[in-house]
Each structure stands twice: as structure tokens, then as C-alpha cells.
Amino acid sequence: MSTVQTPAATTVDPTMAAGTAQFLSPVVIGLEALVVNGKQAHWHVRGSNFIGVHELLDSVVAHAQDWADLAAERIVALGLPIDSRLSTVAAKAKATEVPAGFAQSDVVIRAVIADIDAVLVDLEAAIEGLNEVDMSSQDVAIEIKRGLDKDRWFLFAHLAA
Ligand SMILES: [Fe+2]
């Protein structure tokens, strides 16, 4: 009688998993911070172009949440955990530029762009570092960077030249 053995959690090399976690964990943290701070911006933006910026910020938040999920689940798929508890995000993420209260849209947009730029730094490091670690994990970072670059452009385009 044959017995079916429980499969291994993953088939990946532990060094590859650890490298992926090293480079994608900061991306998850930064994106989760962008989710929370982007909502803060969405609620408090004011100005003549209110509705466009208000709605755009909600799409920035939705994309950030989707990409955090993508990066986190790449780490978990390789068998390692990700600590994205709110207290950990608060301790590790760069402090937001988004103000605490109501602000004009140009101020809010500049602040969210600064927050996005902090995530882009981590994404560039991930793309560079993962080149020697794992192509599939690097692909996750590249996909996220491509989308975040676009959201940054949509925000930047609201600023007067
Ligand atoms: Fe809303």
C-alpha cells in the first residue's frame, strides 16, 4: 500500500527565499504605509480640482494595497513570513510627508509623491539586488515599480509646470 507524503512547504533554495524576503519586505512595509497615508491625503485634500485629486488618491491607495499583497505573497510563497503589523510598519517605514489636517491639493500631491519616492528607492534596490537572487521575485519588483511610476506621473501631472 502506497502512502502519500505531505509535500514540502516549498521547493525553493533557502538562500533564494531569504534574499527575496530581504528585498521585498521593505517594499511591503512602504506600500502598507502608503495605503494608510494615502487615505489620510484622500480625506483631507482641498482645492479647486478637489474631486479629481480625491479620486486619484483612492486609486493610488488601491494600487498600493494590491502591490503590497503581491510582494507579501511572493515572500510567503517561498516559505518565509512577513511582519506587516501596524506597529512594525510604523517603526520601519519612512515618516510620511502628508500633513495631519486639511491641505491644498498641491501640498498634498507633493507629499504623496515624496512618500512614493521612498518606496521607489526600495524598489530600485530590490530590482538590482534580486537580479542575482531570483528572476521571479525581481519580476514582482519590476511590475510594482512600473505601476508606481505611472501613479507618480498621474499625481505629478496635476502640479503646475
Ligand atoms: Fe473615500
Image: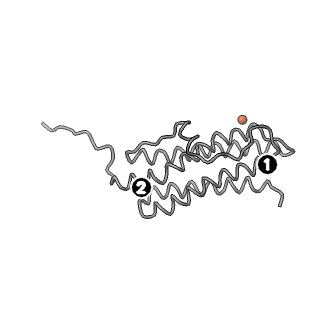
Assign ligand 1 to one image quadrant: top right
Q: Are marks 2 and 1 in contact (CB under 8 Å)?
A: no
Q: Residue at x 75, y 36 (%)?
A: 43
Mark 2–mark 1 distance (CA, rounded to whole Å): 37 Å
**Mark 1 C-beta closer than 8 Å to ligand 1:** no
Quadrant of the snapshot with the C terminus? bottom right
The quadrant in which residue 55 appears is top right
Q: Residue at x 49, y 48 (%)?
A: 25
Horizontal side of residue 26 vs 18, given as left or right? right
Q: Secondary structure at mark 2?
A: helix
Q: Secondary structure at mark 1?
A: helix
Q: Of label 2 and label 1, which has the lower sequence position? A: 2
> Which coloring applies here?
one colour
Residue type marked 1? Val
Residue 13 screen position, x and y as percent:
33, 54
- The number of numbered badges drawn on the structure is 2
Q: On the picture, is 41 further left or further right than 126? A: right
How crowded pointer 2 is (Cα within 10 Å; few <14, some 14-19, many 20+) is rated as: some
Residue 52, image x, y percentages: 79, 45
Kindly indicate the quadrant of the structure image that contains residue 38. Answer: top right
The residue tagged 2 is 19
Quadrant of the rendering where the N terminus is positioned: top left
Instruction: Give above or below for 154 relative to 50.
Output: below
Residue depicted at x 74% and y 38%: 100
Q: Position of residue 76 (x, y in %)?
A: 42, 44
Q: Residue at x 83, y 57 (%)?
A: 160
Q: Dot 1 corresponds to which residue?
A: 107
